Amino acid sequence: MSAAPLYITTPIYYVNDRPHIGHCYTTLVGDVAARMARLIGRDTFFLTGTDEHAEKVVASATQRGLTPIQWADRNADEFRAAFKAMNFSNDDFVRTTEQRHITRASAYIEKLVKSGDIALGDYEGWWDASQEEYLTETVAKDNDFKSPVTKKPLERRTEKNYFFNLPKYEERLRRAIESGEIQILPEQRKNEVLGRIRTGLQRVPVSRAIKPGDADWGIKMPGDPNHRVYVWIEALCNYLTVVDTPERRKYWPKGDGKPNTGEPLVTAPIVHFMAKDILWFHAVIWPAMLMALGEPVPKTVYAHAYFVSEGVKMSKSLGNFIEIDQLKAYAQRYSLDAVRWYLATQGPLGATDADFAYGRFVEVYNADLANGIGNCASRVANMVEKYFEGKVPDPKGVFTFKESSPEHPNATFDWKELPTTLASGYANRLDHAELGEAMKTATRLVSDIDMFIGVTRPFTIAKNLDGENGAANRDRLAAILYCCAEALRIASLMLYPAMPEKMAALWKLWNCSPLTNPDDCNSAFKAPLSELAQWAHPTHGLKPGQKIAKGDALFMRADPKEPMPTKA
Ligand code: MSP
């Protein structure tokens, strides 16, 4: 794991929509990755925001008797509030109507016009007005000349446009993706992108002519007041505009500024997350624009699949989008971190779609949280309270156990060795954005603790603390409970990125907060994971004599017979 600063982005969402599970999912993925990176000790910048210059914003605003910016303000606030409610730790929230974005995006386009990478030409094509994009002849034909997304008829449009010379970068880009210099994940998506590149790239229209009566909405083409920059091209620039300042350039190191079609291709530790619908823009058009600008290209472009709702694809016509209010209703009943947990571990991070279904939610909640980490934490704290007056017992250096029970005749528990392996595996998972897997590492550790308790039966040992073997039994009980508690502390560190509030609450109860402010689950870590997760670390580990309180259950068991939570 390199120590270079890391930059994580989500798409910027259309400001016309209401925040729903799809927006929340990708942003949660970004948030978990950012929190994992910060936990590992990397200087991390996490960005999300809204994409506001689409033509349909003007139409929607007009319908409501508002100006476009009034409508955009209102909805951008909804996204901000939704992301706050989800406890996302984004370092900034960009709106493409902000001057910082407009000024810098215009400067990038102007530079590409000067270098000849963007030039005026004729264009005739199939325009999908609902998605604000031109479709290729093949895609238009395959979809019966209807929008593949909204099924509305496509328009045949002919215009004088500015074009970006994408073919110039085709060869270098193809090699970069094939060789993994630009890592497109998951693998299946990489193959799709390569397949499409091999059919040949065409110039990309980057502007549209301003028609009389058009609202003044969007960025004007630098040097040509008759054209406006096509919203997608401008939107992609957000990733760079936000960090193109002296303080933030460390997250996107400055390139030499010369168009790059040869060797070496400079990449930077940047991860763009999105769903598969918009991979092409991020994997092909944007990196090519960066090559033309002479800037480093992102190392990782990750396109996940979709969340469906109760087994059904979500669509406007069905009106079955799981909106933020629905997620809030779940959070109110099961806690926000339970919702985050479901999204993080059951979401469509790979190539296949995933289901947000109430029945499954309760199942996962009970298995992983109420009966998993929650129950394990109360069990351990209960025993520490009952047998050692709520104080962490002294293990006297005993951290290895060779046990035998009818179910596990040869079980070895080498607790001291465990954390280092886990922590390094965890960093590796982040490099490949295997976030669900990283969380599973932690739940497996919790299961190991439960198994250890099952095999060593501390509650039985506790019945024999007097008499001949009393002292030896007490030592064994102390060692067992210390190991359970210390292992649980380490598991909780790894669970934090998905469940920051609950883990911070546990650390407070156990007097072992790794956070600079134990009352603020979003405050910085005192040390990197490699140090925090060291077994019995003198500062961060559990210390004999330290008080740990039982507190309320972290997660109450859920009754599957209760009706589904609904919006208030
Ligand atoms: N504004 C463009 C993106 C510009 S980025 C420079 C856009 N916006 S969007 O509001 O339509 O958001 C699309 C993204 O929302 C998807 O790529 C994905 O990240 C997220 N999702 C929308 N629906 C989704 C699901 N059903 N499931 C998972 N994520 C989904 O495209």
Image (cartoon, grey):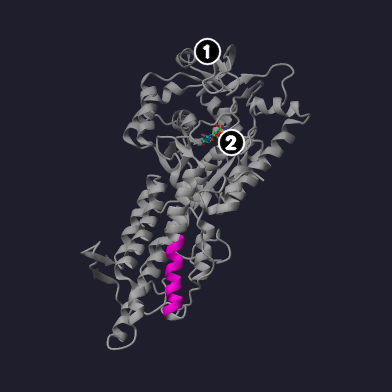
Measured Cα–Cα span from mark 1 to mark 2: 26 Å
Ligand 1: quadrant of the figure: top right
Q: Is residue 193 visible?
A: yes
Does the CB distance between marks 1 and 2 fall below 8 Å?
Answer: no
- Which residue is at a point 50% across and 31% down the rendered structure image? 312
Crowdedness near tag 2: few (<14), some (14–19) or many (≥20) residues, C-alpha within 10 Å = some
x, y (%) of residue 540? 43, 70
x, y (%) of residue 158? 58, 11
Out of 301 and 226, give the one closest to the viewer.
Answer: 301
Which residue of the protein is positioned furthest toward the left in this rendering? 410
x, y (%) of residue 515? 51, 65
Closest to the camera, between mark 1 and mark 2, is 1
x, y (%) of residue 259? 45, 30
Tag 1: residue type? Phe
- Residue bearing mark 1: 145
On residue 13, the disc is 2
- For residue 274, side relative to residue 104 (left or right): left
- Which residue is at a point 70% across and 27% down the rendered structure image? 60
* Chief secondary structure of the magenta portion: helix
Look at the numbered disc 2 and say if its residue's Cβ is closer than 8 Å to ligand 1.
yes
Name which quarter of the figure residue 52 lies in. top right
Residue 464 belongs to magenta span: no
Upstream in sequence: badge 1 or badge 2? 2
Crowdedness near tag 1: few (<14), some (14–19) or many (≥20) residues, C-alpha within 10 Å = many
Q: Is residue 33 visible?
A: no
- For residue 129, side relative to residue 173 (left or right): right
Out of 326 and 222, give the one closest to the viewer.
Answer: 326
Q: Give the magenta part as a residue range.
A: 374-387
